[in-house]
Image (cartoon, helix red, strand yellow):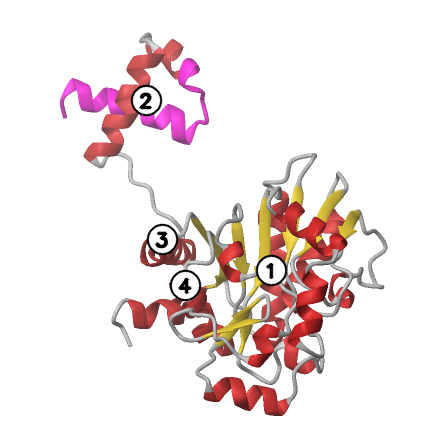
Amino acid sequence: MDYEESLMIKAAWYYYFEDMTQQQVAGLMGITRMRVMKLLEKARQTGIIQFRLRKDGEKRMLLERRLMSAFHLKDAFVVPAPIDPSAVNAGVAEAASLYISERLRDDSLINIGYGDTPSRILNNLATIAEQPLTCVSLTGGVSYYLPDTRSNVFNAKLHLIPAPLLTSSPEMAEALRHESSVMELSRMTALAQMTVVGIGAMHESATIFKSGVLNTNDFLYLRMQGAVGDLLSHFFDKEGRVLQTPIEERLISTPLETLKTLHNVIGVAAGDSKVDAIRAALRGQYLDVLITDDRTAEKALAVDEGQD
């Protein structure tokens, strides 16, 4: 063992095993702090120091990197899938709330989409936020943006589009879109620090079907048109292309082309029924960040990486 290697081992021991600062190591060894930094870096490069993540953490980190690479995302956050499938939405909503709260400023304005998962995120954020949140709804359908009555604290100011999600006719939808109050909220969305959306599946349990906004016939019609899921209730095909249907014409919802222009669009979704929808939303490049669980991430990546 040569002198340089002995120094690397000594510096690494003091720094990593005895929790000394680099300055303390330098003082103890009688060398400069810069010399300590170079010794530690060389120890890492030569394998004297070897870092190992816990297996489950390493797996999730690799999934995140693969998602970012495959779909050109700015970030991805993958959490463990719950044992109970019914807890999927609650799990990713909680993770998303913590992810978002870490990045909030005191004057943060957040855009919130329609659906069960965004509703959970909003309630979680409004409960844990130290400073009041200001949130803007991206769609009509006021009820899904209102506080959960079980929440003791709801620290958020809501700006809601005063309109239904789906109107009775295209003419009514067009008239509502040009109402001054609706147009004002649309202008506010461009100022938001981040945008949070759920990804809906073509499944009877999806919020838009379960709530009765769309019925069984609508579901079958959309299936026949090639729909695999939706963002903000805009239904799209497997490549993420919006389907031009009579339902689309009656929507009061931020267009997906507008969504692409917003800052830090965070998609939150997980579960076997949502894999196709998540993959299509990613292919459509509507999202900057995806928050999901490891089982969903693996399935979403499978086709795009030729594993299926």
Nearer to me, 282 or 13 = 282
Q: CA distance from mark 3 to mark 4?
A: 11 Å
> Badge 3 local density, few (<14 within 10 Å), some, or many (20+)?
some
Report the amino acid beneath label 3. His
How far from the left and from the top, in percent, is residue 175? Answer: 71, 65
Marks 2 and 1, the one that precedes in the sequence = 2
Name the spot of residue 227 as percent of width and height, x first.
Answer: 47, 80
Type of amino acid under label 1: Thr
Report the residue marked by disc 3: 72
Tell me whether circle 3 and circle 1 mark residues in contact (CB < 8 Å): no
Does residue 66 lie above or below 15 as drawn? below
Residue 50 appears left or right of 242? left
Which residue corresponds to mark 1?
254
Q: Amino acid at mark 4?
A: Gly
Q: Residue at x 63, y 58 (%)?
A: 94
Residue 23 drawn in magenta: yes
Left or right, residue 43 beside residue 29: left
Residue at the spot of label 2: 11
Which numbered disc covers residue 284? 4
Mark 2–mark 1 Cα distance, whole angstroms, equals: 57 Å
Q: Nearer the viewer, residue 271 or 143?
A: 143
Q: Please rate how many residues cluster around mark 1, counting C-alpha atoms within 10 Å: few if below 14, some from 14 to 19, many from 20.
A: many
Front of the two marks 3 and 1: 1
Q: CA distance from mark 2 to mark 3?
A: 40 Å
Image height check: is 41 above or below 181?
above
Q: Which residues are magenta?
A: 1-24
- Residue 22 appears at what percent x and percent y? 40, 18
Residue type, mark 2 in image: Ala
Mark 2 vs 3, N-terminal side: 2
Provide the major secondary structure of the magenta segment: helix
Secondary structure, mark 2, is helix
